Image (cartoon, rainbow, N blue to C red):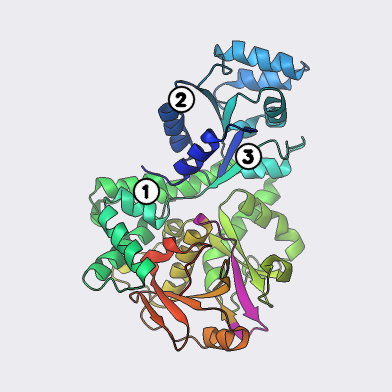
Amino acid sequence: MKRKIYEELLKWENNNDNVKPLMILGVRQSGKTYIINEFCKNEYSNYVYVNLFENTNVIELYNSNLTSIEKFNRLKLLLDFDFEKEDTILFIDEIQESEKLISELKYFQENHNNVRIICAGSLLGVKLKRSKFSFPVGKVKMLNMYPMDFEEFLVAMNQEMLIDLIKDCYKNNKQITSPIHEKALNLYRIYLITGGMPESVNNMVKTNGDYIKYDKTILTDIVSSYFKDMDKYVTNESEALRINRVYDSLPSQLSNISNKFQYSNVSKDARAREYATAIDWLEASNMVLRCKAIKTPEIPLEGFVDVDTFKLYLSDVGILNNILKLNIEDILNDNISLYKDVIAENFVANQLVCNGFDLYYYRSNNTSEVDFLLYTKDGIIPVEVKAGNATQSKSLKLYIEKYKPKYAIRISTKDFGYDPKTNIKSIPLYATFLIKGDIDEL
């Protein structure tokens, strides 16, 4: 499947100055190993793949008391591969299994700058955050990889012509019109079923979009695999229990009337100090996305964060709907009642993160809220998300009147449009993947 991160890998490959080992972070089963393997095979003449789950000899080598250069030379012997040859790359998978090898990436960068190395692994973010060894800061380039965004999903579904039309309408602010608009909305709802996990998307592709044949157990198994891996990366059973409790609470957290994460929704007597580490673990694993509350929408947004107030989204909207045990027919028929706004909001959060945005939302003394604030070249842009055609929003109106942004964005099931009276740009849910930091001026 075509993935956008491939272009980032090419940029890294073409940077011949100060080459650093590349580390890919991302939620488990988001397709890291597949796309790195494709890149290495396509772009290099000589390629060796090492999986530390399978090749424990490498772990033993780096646990030894040998010097860095001795380890380096013996690694070549152990793999029977000279990765210093021209047009050569080494892919180390499951690198989280060797903290000492992660530390040694500094030696590779400083002393063997010609060596191309890519690293990835399951729950690598958790391992890095809890590593007892020093991370080679500044010596490793890091990239985040997320589940497939909606554009990648459309490519997988052979909808390139639709993508081109959506992009044209977005750029020129013209309506896409029915029945194409309805077709795009239907594909959006199919994406709500599959989410962006490659195995899930591929299963829908194989059925030619026949949702009756789609295997819903794929996402169930993915979530189960997350927690099967957990035991390797938690300090004790109590921590694992707290992580499970937080994750299980997320669907209800997203729909609670307070519009913020509440520890009391995890368990009756829960306290922040007891569950902060569990939330950090879920963030580091990329299983959840934190959206920070802002009371004063000024630049820089990070400087005005209310540290005690935030929301947590699931990393993949398909997984959210799987956890909610929604019937596929109800999703396709838009028969989700009050919860569909929550699902649409999670979808938008996923798309924005894929485009490099940090997640913030506006919250004013429990009286007004705007779903997202985007820091762009046009300043801070408020974004309201609606799951249907009813787009009236008192909070967005109050925000515009008070802070007078250059314009605002409303994402909904409505077609493209712009109202010069309110300065609100209307973007259909299926076009969210086009919202980037260089938003064109209106």
Q: Residues within 10 Å of mark 2 (few under 14, many from 20)?
A: few
Residue that badge 2 annotates: 44
Please tell me whether mark 2 sits on a helix, a strand or a loop.
loop
Q: CA distance from mark 3 to mark 2?
A: 19 Å
Badge 3 is on which residue? 141
Task: Give the foreground label among 1 and 3.
Answer: 3
Report whether 234 appears left or right of 349: right
Mark found first going from the N terminus, 1 or 3? 3
Q: Nearer the viewer, residue 46 or 367?
A: 46
The image position of residue 435, as x and y in percent, is 46, 64
Q: Is residue 189 visible?
A: no
| Image coordinates for residue 29, horizontal then vertical, percent | 47, 43
Please state the total of marks drawn on the protein image.
3
Name the spot of residue 369 as percent of width and height, x first: 58, 80
Q: Is 363 within the magenta?
A: yes
First in sequence, mark 2 or 1: give its number. Answer: 2
Range drawn in magenta: 354-368
Q: Name the side, left or right, on which 106 lies relative to 343.
A: right
The residue under the point 27% across, 59% down is: 162
Amino acid type, mark 3 = Lys
Which is nearer the eye, 52 or 378? 378
Say which amino acid is labelled 1: Ser
